Image: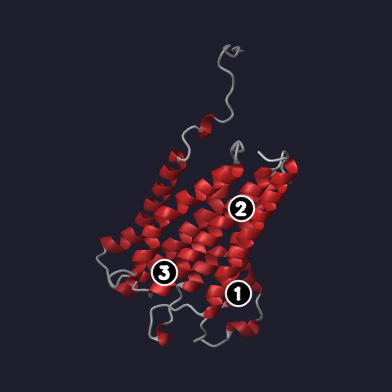
């Protein structure tokens, strides 16, 4: 057995010394890998028509959302808690959202997905709201002196949130399956971050546009921001009970 060298105590925060640079590098690498997986094949085959590109762009956004609501909390819940949770996870959210804008907004260009600007705006705000919910949930979990539950239980909650839309669509009434093919909103799909991205970018050629957002989509975005405000409010309350840090 090798004795620990004096003067070199264990540093539980060593893995965070490079933050947020390390996290930003990992996130950008994930974005590039996602682009290569979903869009690389389209370019290699020379199939650059908008109708071919658009489904690949939708898959790209879904993959990014899964990374945002599942992989991000999985990484942070497996690490030593940050000294200042609120600030740490707000920085994380900023690192996620800034490069993401360079992917979302260009999808309105005619040589890309050709989605209306309103659709890109809705997607961008949907990502912002969902990222703030995740950041608030992580900050709340780490805000107290003691965790309210094991990390695996908190991770299960994040996975459940990600799958909520899929579950809702699976159990919805049979009558909904034969609904109006020209409906402007599938409420069941907006039940979770991942399926919400798919719903907002749904092909609605009957409307004259590649995709279209309705008032219901904006209400859903507003609900996500209210949920984010609730998560951050709960974080502040829990931090106040601890006496601040």
Residue 77 visible in image: no
Residue plotted at (53% across, 79% down): 215
In the image, residue 89 sits, relative to residue 55, either above or below, namely above
In the image, residue 142 sits, relative to residue 3, either above or below, namely below
Give the structural element (helix, strand or loop) at label 1: helix
Q: How many marks?
A: 3
Query: Which residue is more in the foreground, 232 or 68?
Result: 232
Determine whether, in the image, residue 138 is placed left or right of residue 97: right
Residue plotted at (42% across, 74% down): 118
Q: Which quadrant of the figure contains the C terminus?
A: top right
Q: Residues within 10 Å of mark 1 (few under 14, many from 20)?
A: many
Cα–Cα span, label 2 and label 1: 24 Å
Residue plotted at (36% across, 58% down): 102
Residue 131 visible in image: yes
Residue beneath label 2, please?
136
Sequence-earlier tag: 3 or 2: 3
Give the structural element (helix, strand or loop) at label 2: helix
Residue beneath label 1, please?
188
Camera-near label (2 vs 1) is 2
Query: Which residue is more in the foreground, 170 or 162?
Result: 162
The x and y percentages for residue 211 are: 42, 77
Cα–Cα span, label 3 and label 2: 24 Å
Residue beneath label 3, please?
120
Determine whether, in the image, residue 187 is placed left or right of residue 18: right
In the image, residue 81 sits, relative to residue 56, either above or below, namely above
Sequence-earlier tag: 2 or 1: 2
In the picture, the disc for residue 91 is none
Sequence-earlier tag: 1 or 3: 3
């Amino acid at each position: 057995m090798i004795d620990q060298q004096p003067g070199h105590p264990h540093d539980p925060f060593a893995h965070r010394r490079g933050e947020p640079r390390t996290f930003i590098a990992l996130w950008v690498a994930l974005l590039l890998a996602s682009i290569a997986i979903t869009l690389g094949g389209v370019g290699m085959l020379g199939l650059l028509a908008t109708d071919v590109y658009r489904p690949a762009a939708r898959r790209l956004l879904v993959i990014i959302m899964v990374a945002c609501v599942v992989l991000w909390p999985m990484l942070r819940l497996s690490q030593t808690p940050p000294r200042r949770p609120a600030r740490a996870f707000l920085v994380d959210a900023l690192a996620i959202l800034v490069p993401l804008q360079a992917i979302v907004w260009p999808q309105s260009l005619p040589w890309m997905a050709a989605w209306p600007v309103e659709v890109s705006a809705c997607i961008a705000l949907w990502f912002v709201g969902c990222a703030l919910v995740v950041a608030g949930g992580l900050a709340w979990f780490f805000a107290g002196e003691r965790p309210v539950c094991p990390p695996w239980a908190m991770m299960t909650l994040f996975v459940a949130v990600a799958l909520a839309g899929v579950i809702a669509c699976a159990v919805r009434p049979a009558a909904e399956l034969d609904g109006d093919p020209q409906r402007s909103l599938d409420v069941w799909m907006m039940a979770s971050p991942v399926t919400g991205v798919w719903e907002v970018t749904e092909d609605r050629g009957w409307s004259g546009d590649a995709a279209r957002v309705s008032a219901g989509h904006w209400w859903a975005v507003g609900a996500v921001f209210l949920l984010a405000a609730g998560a951050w409010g709960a974080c502040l309350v829990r931090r106040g009970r601890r006496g601040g840090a």
